[in-house]
Image (cartoon, helix red, strand yellow):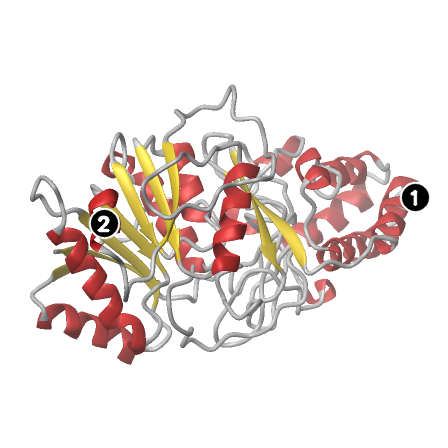
Amino acid sequence: MTAPGPRGAAVTGRGGGGLGWRSGGSAGLGTAGPRVRAPLWRRRGSSSLLPLRAAASRTALPGPWRSRSRSWGRSWGSASSGASWRPGSCEASPGRFGFPVLQELEQRLRSAPGSSLLADILHQTVLHPLCVKYPPSIKYRRCFLTELIKKHESTTAEPLDELYNTLADILNEKESTRCYRNYLLPTGESVTLSESEAIISQGTTGLVTWDAALHLAEWAMENSTVFSNRTVLELGSGIGFTGLAICKTCNPKAYIFSDYHHCVLKQLVENIRLNGFAVQPGTTDLIQPKSEGQEAEGKNYQQPKLIVAELDWGSVTEKQLLDLQPDVIIAADVVYDPEITASLIGMLQKLSTFRADGKPPEVYIAFTIRNPDTYHLFQAELDKVGIGWQIIPAHSTSIFLYDTQSNVTILQLFI
């Protein structure tokens, strides 16, 4: 998520963005420590997977694999080490994973030395159609297959040529600064994102998906009535994960994505198209899509009206405010720097003032508390201008995999 102004939170680089690992020196498909991103083996309807970062999603494995705990992982793809966890890096070696998944895999290979199980895993992860079409990073796929081969070779299981051939093909691929992330929703639909492999890219941190966006999307899916048949404005949409998840699961009447950085807006539009949506003509400053995406026909949701708006909180015009008219305002990870707190609060006050019906919109802000001082400053500034707030209770369902050590909070504001 991005917003006007610099990011204040410390960030760390990430090396790959594909089948992901989390921070803390431990990584893998469902570790006992911080949660990790893992390959795409999952039970339908719960969105946890095993290694496949082209997916914060899941695809069923045969037999007992289907009933494995969701702690085995949710998305094939990402993690970085350091104080500020970010998805998308395979900083940790898969050999240090220690995941129960790979440990059980080795046991199963020893007890059933045929190659069918390994072939199943390969086709549910790296060779899954979703990952073939929208592949995770080369580094992640390479790390994952290398670890899979190690486990395979530690047993007496029959060799699987397809496994080695797949790794050889990946090694011959050209490195890229971008990769795909795929997130499988409880409805069975997926959200596919094209992301940067670097946390900071082209002068912004808005080209990757942050934990608060995943957290807010989970809360939204559990509270879909907040968004159903209503106009939703998202401030600092970044590359679009939260909004796309809400559009596919919560049936909003209209959804307005907004951001400020031109590179983020361009990538946002590409991701909207990638997920089968069309950006509708509107009265705000729009970025028109050019790329072709997935077909949206036959989906389990109604197509809302989608608008992409370039909004600078500090210089938003009266005309823009009158055109927006949101019933609900949301934002994820935009409270990270004291310098932009005043701009954000001022934007919210203006949005309330320019409501045609005089009824203030509902406002929900999700953020990761990296610096308690910044968090308390935001609350103090809200109090100072008379904006009420309350902490929203944690939602009960965990769908996507993100760092459990991240302190993510959602505030409802009363403007």
Q: Which label was assigned to residue 174? A: none
Q: Residue at x 56, y 50 (%)?
A: 73
Kind of residue indicated by mark 2? Lys
- Kindly identify which residue carries mark 2: 319
Q: Is residue 293 left or right of residue 265?
A: right
Q: Residue at x 31, y 41 (%)?
A: 283
Could you tell me which secondary element the residue under label 1 belongs to?
Answer: loop
Q: Residue at x 50, y 67 (%)?
A: 204
Question: Is 221 drawn above or below residue 5 in the view shown?
Answer: above
**Of residues 149 and 286, the one drawn nearer to the viewer in this rendering:** 286
CA separation, marks 1 and 2? Answer: 66 Å
Q: Residue at x 70, y 46 (%)?
A: 135
Question: Is 167 drawn above or below residue 139 in the view shown?
Answer: above
Number of residues whose C-alpha sits closer than 10 Å to that of mark 1, classed few (under 14), some (14–19) or many (20 or more): some
Q: Position of residue 16 (x, y in %)?
A: 67, 62
Q: Position of residue 373 (x, y in %)?
A: 27, 80
Quarter of the figure that contains the C terminus = bottom left
**Of residues 118 and 220, the one drawn nearer to the viewer in this rendering:** 220
Q: Is residue 245 left or right of residue 60?
A: left
Could you tell me which secondary element the residue under label 2 belongs to?
Answer: helix
Q: Is residue 368 left or right of residue 322?
A: right
Quarter of the figure that contains the N terminus = bottom left
The residue mark sitting in front, 1 or 2, is 2
Say whether marks 1 and 2 touch (CB < 8 Å).
no
